[in-house]
């Protein structure tokens, strides 16, 4: 009888232990569910669709850029419209490293005013504004190269992004959407067939973005094609949306590039400034054969 009492006591304690263990497991599960729910809620908040800057009006924005004027100097030549670099074939990393090296040297030379005056004529000097443009490109490029290999979080897709671009190769047209509303369209030139074909893609642009500048040392852009930089937004790899040269204006609306997407320089400036203002992380570019 005593041993039976002990056995029943042990069994009772076992039930109590099991109940306590079950209660602890449930408490941990509830806590884990709360943590997961909080994480999901925070993620939703982080990826909630962004809003346009307050009182932002595209047409006013576009008009302000048009009124500021456009310097056509250097539009006769740039690396993208030459055969020195072919997207999908040549290495973008090599090109960017060459740009970085040349631009850093340009800054050093431009800031050595005494030497500059001896070598160049007065009118060939970099203005303060031109020097700032080069410095801005160097800052953007250095930052891009430093982040190379990291993964960007996609916060939106296609028309959910504030800036959505649809490039239709069959009509050679770029459609620009702002907050899901078709707001503008531009003639483009995508890659010629076969070797220079522009591939289909639907991506958040990888960057970098480059502001236009014209080299005073190489005004024809003939130093490895790096003398002149048009307004450029890199989409993926070596494929960029950029301003074209004067000799190619008449070709806009037809397939004529070496793989990139050419725009009239004024339209390239508008697009560059818009993406810079709204942000690459709020931009999406789709390239395809037709609207269907």
Image (tube, rainbow, N blue to C red):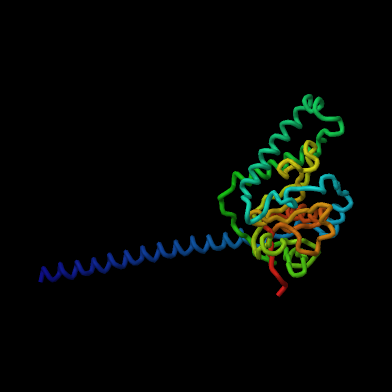
Q: Is residue 248 visible to us here?
A: yes
Q: Observer-nearest residue: 25 or 151?
A: 151
Q: Against 52, is 133 above or below?
A: above
Tell me: 17 left or right of 169. left
Q: Is residue 276 visible to us here?
A: no
- The residue most toward the bottom is 292
**Which residue is depicted at the point 73% across and 35% down?**
106
Occupied quadrant, residue 29: bottom left
Occupied quadrant, residue 204: bottom right
**Which residue is depicted at the point 77% across and 56% down?**
271
Where is residue 283? Give x, y as percent: 69, 59
Tell me: 211 left or right of 207. right
Where is residue 69? Give x, y as percent: 88, 49
Tell me: 94 left or right of 179. left
Task: Tell how many labels.
Answer: 0
Which of the image's four quarters has the N terminus?
bottom left
Tell me: 231 left or right of 3. right
Which of the image's four quarters has the C terminus?
bottom right
Where is residue 27? Give x, y as percent: 40, 63
Occupied quadrant, residue 122: top right
Where is residue 161? Give x, y as percent: 69, 63
**Which residue is depicted at the point 66% across and 63% down?**
199
């Amino acid at each position: 009888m005593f041993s039976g009492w002990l056995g029943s006591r042990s069994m009772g304690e076992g039930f109590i232990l099991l109940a306590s263990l079950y209660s602890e497991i449930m408490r941990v599960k509830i806590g884990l569910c709360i943590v997961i729910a909080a994480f999901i809620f925070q993620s939703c908040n982080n990826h909630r669709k962004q809003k346009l800057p307050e009182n932002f009006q595209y047409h006013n924005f576009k008009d302000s850029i048009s009124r500021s004027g456009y310097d056509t100097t250097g539009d006769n030549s740039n690396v993208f419209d030459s055969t020195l670099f072919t997207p999908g074939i040549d290495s973008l990393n090599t090109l960017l490293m060459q740009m970085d090296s040349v631009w850093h040297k340009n800054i050093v030379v431009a800031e050595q005013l005494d030497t500059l005056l001896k070598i160049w004529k007065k009118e060939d000097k970099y203005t303060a504004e031109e020097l700032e443009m080069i410095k801005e490109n160097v800052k953007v490029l250095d930052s891009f190269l430093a982040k190379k290999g990291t993964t960007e979080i996609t916060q939106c897709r296609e028309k959910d992004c504030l800036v959505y671009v649809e490039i239709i190769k069959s009509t050679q047209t770029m459609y620009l959407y702002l907050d899901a509303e078709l707001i503008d369209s531009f003639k483009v030139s995508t890659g010629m067939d076969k070797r220079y074909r522009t591939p289909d893609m639907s991506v958040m642009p990888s960057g970098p973005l480059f502001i236009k500048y014209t080299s005073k040392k190489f005004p024809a852009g003939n130093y490895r094609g790096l003398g002149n930089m048009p307004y450029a937004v890199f989409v993926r790899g070596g494929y960029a949306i950029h301003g074209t040269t004067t000799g190619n204006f008449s070709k806009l609306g037809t397939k004529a590039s070496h793989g990139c997407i050419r725009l009239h320089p004024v339209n390239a400036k508008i697009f560059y400034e818009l993406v810079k203002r709204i942000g690459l992380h709020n931009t999406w570019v789709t390239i395809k054969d037709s609207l269907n």
